[in-house]
Image (spheres, rainbow, N blue to C red):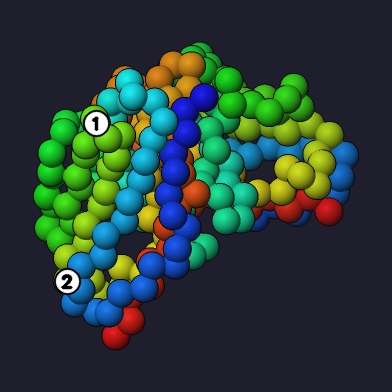
Amino acid sequence: GAGVSQTPSNKVTEKGKYVELRCDPISGHTALYWYRQSLGQGPEFLIYFQGTGAADDSGLPNDRFFAVRPEGSVSTLKIQRTERGDSAVYLCASSSRGGHYNEQFFGPGTRLTVL
Amino acid sequence: QKEVEQNSGPLSVPEGAIASLNCTYSDRGSQSFFWYRQYSGKSPELIMFIYSNGDKEDGRFTAQLNKASQYVSLLIRDSQPSDSATYLCAVLGGQAGTALIFGKGTTLSVSS
């Protein structure tokens, strides 16, 4: 079956602009995660959804970052007033289980560049 | 704050050799451990997970977990040039206990 998909694959924006990144998880997966990865680093957790609700948003760096999953499937990560430090690859992952034994499968990522 | 430590490498091994990748973690209460492989410019790909002390084998890959020493390793037997990648170790964390907390990864280079 289809894996996790993310759009766009690349996004270039100017400092101060608003961006939206989309994630479509594996069909039937109730758990959805957003991470971001900077060069030379491992992915860094941002937010976790179980169904429609954000079960853990402890990784969001500040209030410029927000994510939604209104119907429990597709999720959108929204970044306001982008800064150059937001440049990274934003990864989405999904899992069929959200508990302690969940295996997460990653999408291809969106490379965000803030000029 | 949970931490995961990995030697960044690069680890260089000849084709056919055993590659040994190591990872330590800070939280003694961690229960679930994952190894991801990441090719340059690609996203992480899950290759192994382990929850119990001891060894878990899957093809050429063996994950080893020692909770007393807070140590998890990945062995790759008969290494191939196609195994050249960055290997990321992760444990579960976050407020809900389900987020992956990653190390920085170890770069493996297999020479033919």
Q: Which residue is located at x 13 percent, y 39 percent?
A: B54
Who is closer to the viewer here, B62 or A84? B62
What secondary structure is found at the residue carrying circle 1? loop
**Drawn side of residue A85 relative to residue B68, left or right:** right
Q: Which residue is located at x 47 percent, y 34 percent?
A: B3
Residue A23 position, x and y percent, is 52, 38
Q: Is residue B27 visible?
A: yes
Task: State the image quarter where residue B7 is shown.
Answer: bottom left
**Drawn side of residue A87 relative to residue B45, left or right:** right
Residue indicated by mark 2 = B78
Quadrant housing the C terminus of chain B? bottom left
Q: Residue furthest bottom?
A: B112
Residue type at numbered disc 1: Lys
Same chain check for tags 1 and 2: yes
Residue indicated by mark 1 = B67
Q: Is residue A8 visible?
A: no
Identify the disc placed on residue B111: none
Residue A43 position, x and y percent, is 52, 43
- A86 versus B85 height, above or below: above
